[in-house]
């Protein structure tokens, strides 16, 4: 078998070293408005219950657990640093209230095919608290066989016995936060965790037959160099997780207070980051990983890689998914959800979150009701992001438009990307090339009406 190696040169990466949305939604979350309220959210749930806003496909659930025992300096997540585990008891009580508000409208037993516990650190919860949380969710929802039930794991908060607990609770996918194995880098970001510990946990997880094991990596951290990150990549190839998420660190200390503890003089140069990305792609693909897209790699037999080959990839606020496009209920502080043609986000502080629920109100702080144009452009962008192809006739039939007329300026802009070898414009539609898949965000951005109006992209991460 011939192993594909990244076709990207460092010069090509530099050309597209620009910022842009990740398109876990369209419109993106920075477009949400406070005019969207709990009343709008209640109406969206009522429409789902009636069957008018969706086909009542199984739900996806996201539960945000914000607590962490220690601060990782690179982190831009919504989290609460505390060693007081009793705070979780109160939080779980309010999560129960939020779920019960949903079932008061939707009814008990709505089918769920996807669950993700994120944070913060979900494994901040004790085994008993995790059992309580899962029992509460199962009382209110019906988890379908064969679904994806995942949890983010901080290796410092878990041992082999806890893996047994997670398996017993029905979790079938784990995501380990590794970031980098180099001790100097770990010290610089205040996250010390020996490689041996991660290797032992992954080995034990395999023995317990979890369906998929993911490892998160970050390049561009302080004290990293192309040479040091090559050593981490070599260890990752030995570890051989089913999936790898490779993220670029964005240093934004003016927005994220923890990052102010990072010495900017210790950050790698822009050229060093480009080298790290180029080396990473070449190393992982040479090791047999499939580039799924948007920072994600998977072994060929992993369901994510299979879904890509079969054109069944989907994308939601947790990233790429094998599950069909469905409504998403976000639970907990700052969680984002999607119901029908609406997006919503919960209050971003626990105090505000608790206050809403004390009043028996959904803790929705902002959101968006999508226009017809938003839904149309979402369909095009998600087709590009997930399948790498847009069929004009399917869009025309679904939205009763003339594709070439409606998107005349966008197709003109794609001419430049076609010259650069990223897309092929065909009479029947748009095809992203093999090389263009590495820059698919740049292709999708052409159809983003909000970016056309607002060219300030400083708020976004780099597109590769």
Image (cartoon, rainbow, N blue to C red):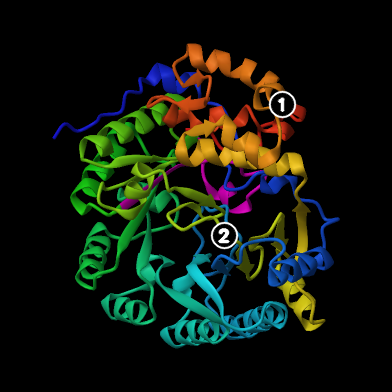
Label 2, on which residue? 326
Does residue 240 belong to the magenta stretch? Answer: no
In the image, the segment drawn in magenta is: 243-264
Q: Position of residue 296 (x, y in %)?
A: 40, 44
Of residues 224 and 77, the one nearer the viewer is 77
Of residues 421 and 169, the one nearer the viewer is 421
Residue 179, visible in the rendered structure: no
* Left or right of 244 in this view: 376: right
Question: Residue at the location (76% across, 52% down)?
Answer: 368
- Dot 2 or dot 1, earlier in sequence: 2
Question: Residue at the location (58% across, 86% down)?
Answer: 89
Label 1, on which residue? 406
* Left or right of 259 in this view: 51: right
Question: Residue at the location (37% across, 27% down)?
Answer: 434
| SS under mark 1 | helix
How crowded pointer 1 is (Cα within 10 Å; few <14, some 14-19, many 20+) is rated as few
| SS under mark 2 | loop
């Amino acid at each position: 078998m011939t192993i594909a190696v990244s076709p990207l040169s460092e010069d090509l990466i530099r050309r597209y070293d620009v910022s842009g949305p990740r398109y876990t939604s369209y419109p993106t979350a920075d477009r949400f408005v406070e005019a969207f309220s709990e009343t709008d959210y209640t109406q969206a749930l009522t429409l789902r219950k009636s069957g008018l806003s969706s086909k009542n496909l199984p739900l996806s659930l996201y539960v945000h657990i914000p607590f962490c025992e220690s601060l990782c300096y690179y982190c831009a997540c919504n989290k609460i640093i505390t060693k007081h585990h009793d705070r979780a008891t109160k939080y779980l009580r309010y999560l129960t209230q939020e779920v019960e508000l949903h079932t008061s409208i939707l009814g008990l037993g709505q089918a769920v095919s996807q669950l993700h516990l994120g944070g913060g650190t979900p494994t901040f919860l004790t085994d008993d608290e995790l059992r309580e949380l899962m029992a509460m969710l199962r009382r209110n929802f019906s988890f379908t066989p064969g679904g994806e039930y995942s949890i983010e794991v901080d290796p410092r908060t878990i041992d082999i016995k806890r893996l047994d607990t997670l398996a017993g609770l029905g979790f079938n996918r784990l995501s380990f936060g590794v970031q980098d194995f180099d001790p100097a880098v770990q010290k610089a970001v205040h996250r010390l965790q020996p490689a041996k510990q991660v290797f032992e946990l992954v080995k034990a997880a395999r023995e317990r037959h979890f369906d998929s094991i993911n490892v998160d990596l970050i390049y561009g951290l302080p004290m990293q160099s192309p040479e040091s990150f090559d050593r981490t990549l070599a260890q990752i190839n030995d570890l051989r997780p089913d999936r790898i998420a490779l993220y670029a660190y964005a240093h934004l200390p003016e927005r994220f207070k923890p990052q102010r503890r990072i010495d900017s003089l210790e950050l790698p140069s822009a050229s060093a980051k480009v080298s790290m990305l180029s080396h990473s792609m070449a190393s992982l693909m040479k090791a047999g990983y499939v580039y799924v897209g948007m920072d994600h790699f998977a072994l060929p037999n992993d369901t994510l890689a299979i879904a890509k080959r079969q054109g069944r990839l989907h994308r939601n606020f947790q990233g790429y998914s094998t599950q069909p496009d469905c409504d998403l209920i976000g639970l907990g502080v700052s969680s984002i959800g999607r119901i029908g043609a609406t997006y919503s986000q919960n209050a971003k502080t626990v105090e505000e979150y608790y206050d809403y629920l004390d009043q028996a109100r959904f803790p929705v702080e902002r959101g968006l009701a999508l226009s017809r144009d938003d839904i149309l452009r979402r369909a095009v962008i998600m087709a590009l992001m997930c399948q790498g192809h847009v069929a004009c006739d399917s869009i025309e039939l679904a939205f009763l438009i003339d594709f070439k007329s409606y998107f005349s300026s966008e197709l003109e802009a794609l001419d430049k990307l076609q010259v650069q070898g990223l897309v092929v414009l065909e009479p029947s539609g748009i095809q992203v090339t093999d090389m263009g898949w590495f820059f698919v965000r740049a292709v999708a951005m052409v159809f983003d009406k909000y970016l056309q109006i607002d060219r300030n992209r400083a708020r976004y991460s780099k597109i590769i």
